[in-house]
Image: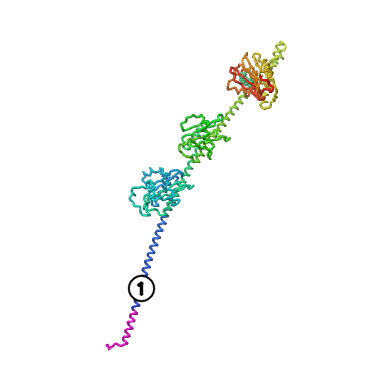
Amino acid sequence: MAETIGAADIADNVAYLAYLAAALSAAVAAAALWLLERRRRVRDRRRYRERLAALESTVQAGTARILRRRELTRAILEISTTLLREHSLSIVLDRLLAATLENFGFSAGAFYLRSSPGEHFVRAAIAGLPRSHTEALLGQPVDPMTFDQILSPEFRVRETYYYVPGERAAELGFPVGLRRFPELADVPRSRSGAWQERDVIAFPFFDRHGRITGLLVPDDPVERRFPNDEVIRAIEMFAALASVAVENARLATQRETATRQMAEVLRVSGELLAEERLDDLLLAILRAALRTFDLAGGEIALLDQARDVFVRRAALGRVVSEPIGAEIDPATVQRRLAAERRTAEGYYETSDALTFPFPDAAGRIIGFLAPELPHGSGPIARETARTMQIYANFAGLAVARAEVRGLEIRRLRELEEIAQMKSDFVSTVSHELRTPLTSIKGFISILIHRRGAMSAEQRGEALRIVDSEANRLIRLVDDLLAAARLERGAFHVELRSTPVNAVVQRAVTAVAMEYPARRFVVCPGGDGLASHTDPDHALRIVTNLLTNAAKYSPEGGEIVVNVGGDGDQVTIEVVDAGPGIPRDERERIFERFVRLDDQVRSNAGTGLGLYISRQLAKAVGGTLTLEESGAPGSRFRLTLRAAESGLGS
Ligand code: ADP
């Protein structure tokens, strides 16, 4: 049976094989699936890990950036605080520069500043150089050409950032500035993005008018790489901070200067009150003005009103060729005070001088203060000009004060004189009244009580004396009344054609009677010589002149009266050979109550005669003067208007 294989057996085997094959393929498929699944998982895990790593590094980079930003913010905050606290510009700039270099990885750098747009830049802060170099370079001006080139549109990346590539810097022949360090000589810098040895980046900053006042120039990056944009932006901010510092410092300096100047002005105003003499005061003002502005010399000149020229009254500093009191060349003054030289501030500016005028109350320039400026010092600041003008005005005040004081002193003197005159007057008048009254009273008593014992001749003589003394009293009272009327302006004047020779003759006759021991010589004017005057007043004046001549000249002395006329004037001169009148009393004797000392005691009088005479002469349109006599004695001249029909002499 074994040798025969039945159909059933075959069928069984085939089925079994089929089953096996099926089972096998199922197993293979399952294995393949499992493998596939496993592979996917591995890949996913790897991807996941990769993503995780990427995420991690992103987070790390972000954190670093945040940390860096925090650092920067801290640095900026710190600098800002320094800015607020620290007044010294150089300290602020040093800190700012150090922070810039430290935060952005530069090993050297500098700040350059200039005080105004036209001026040179000066090295204001330097970092990264040996101390000895720094000291030599600080404060030194730099070649302006270089900066003009750096700040040209060619290199302008944007407003706050200029970049000059090394090759261009070399072509332009920029001087080897701060950045040349021997130890960097062999560092290769040709790769793109690398820092070239001569590369320049400059960050300008601006004042409030938008003018460039400074430059921040960092140099020699530690990593020899050109800073990325983020760093550039941050440095720009540091440059902006520097501009704030500079403006701050400028304001502080201005404030300080203004305070110092005001203190000085106040001190001088104190001096103004203390100093008595005008010239001392002007010198003090000039000295203070010059000291306030650190100037070596200058002058103050005042207008001499009488001569209409300016005169030097205070000078300091320069080797003064003309002394104090010297006249200043009018051409110089005219040039300095020419209208077109006037500035908006009110002072005058020429190429070689500044002139600060001061006016009087009416606005006329009565003086000026002219400081001497050092050569090439340029225009002065407006504040300085203003303060200078204050000093000039002080000088104006000083002059006004001196004038007021002068007036006060004169007034005081006048008051003193008037007081003195009044007391003199009282004693003179009492004396003048008493003398004739005593004499009248004496003779009247004698006439009453001893009439019988007197001869007719004696009685006649006594009565003549009484009459004469009574006349003297009447004249005195008359004079007093006349003076009082003249004072009040209540004086009657009646002008008419008056024969002059006749008036003179009447006066001579009257006075000659009173002074029989004097010789009167009359040289009359032409016949018909007439004056348009008040005859009573004319008579009174001539009588008074003749009385004085008789009173004050020695017995036997000749008294000459010259009468003359020249068309519209008539003159009457009374010349005596007496003691004369001292030159400096010539005007004074025409004042009320003035009597010359030596005559007060020896001659009767009130000091009213000449006063009344001159006032009367004026009232009739004439003059009364004391002339140079050419000989001992006095020569009074009365000038009157000629009458229209007058013939002249
Ligand atoms: P009085 O004669 O009353 O003193 P006057 O006013 O007439 O006053 O004169 C003022 C003064 O001037 C006199 O006191 C005298 O000192 C002086 N004086 C006037 N005339 C003469 C003269 N002819 N010679 C000298 N001195 C004179």
Residue 426 in sight here:
no
x and y, in percent, of residue 406 in the image:
56, 30
Query: Image height check: is 621 above or below 264?
Result: above
- Secondary structure state at the residue bearing disc 1: helix
Q: Residue 279 magenta-drawn?
A: no
Where on the image, by quarter, is ligand 1?
Answer: top right
x and y, in percent, of residue 91 in the image:
42, 46
Q: Which residue is mark 1?
A: 34
Q: Amino acid at mark 1?
A: Trp
- If the image is split into quadrants, where does the C terminus sit? top right
Query: Image height check: is 155 above or below 561?
Result: below
Magenta residues? 1-23
Residue drawn at (48%, 29%) of the image: 322
| Residue nearer the viewer, 513 or 416 | 513
Relative to 323, 435 lies left or right: right
Main SS category, magenta section: helix
Quadrant location of residue 36? bottom left
Relative to 31, 508 lies left or right: right
x and y, in percent, of residue 496 in the image:
70, 23
Query: Image height check: is 31 above or below 304?
Result: below
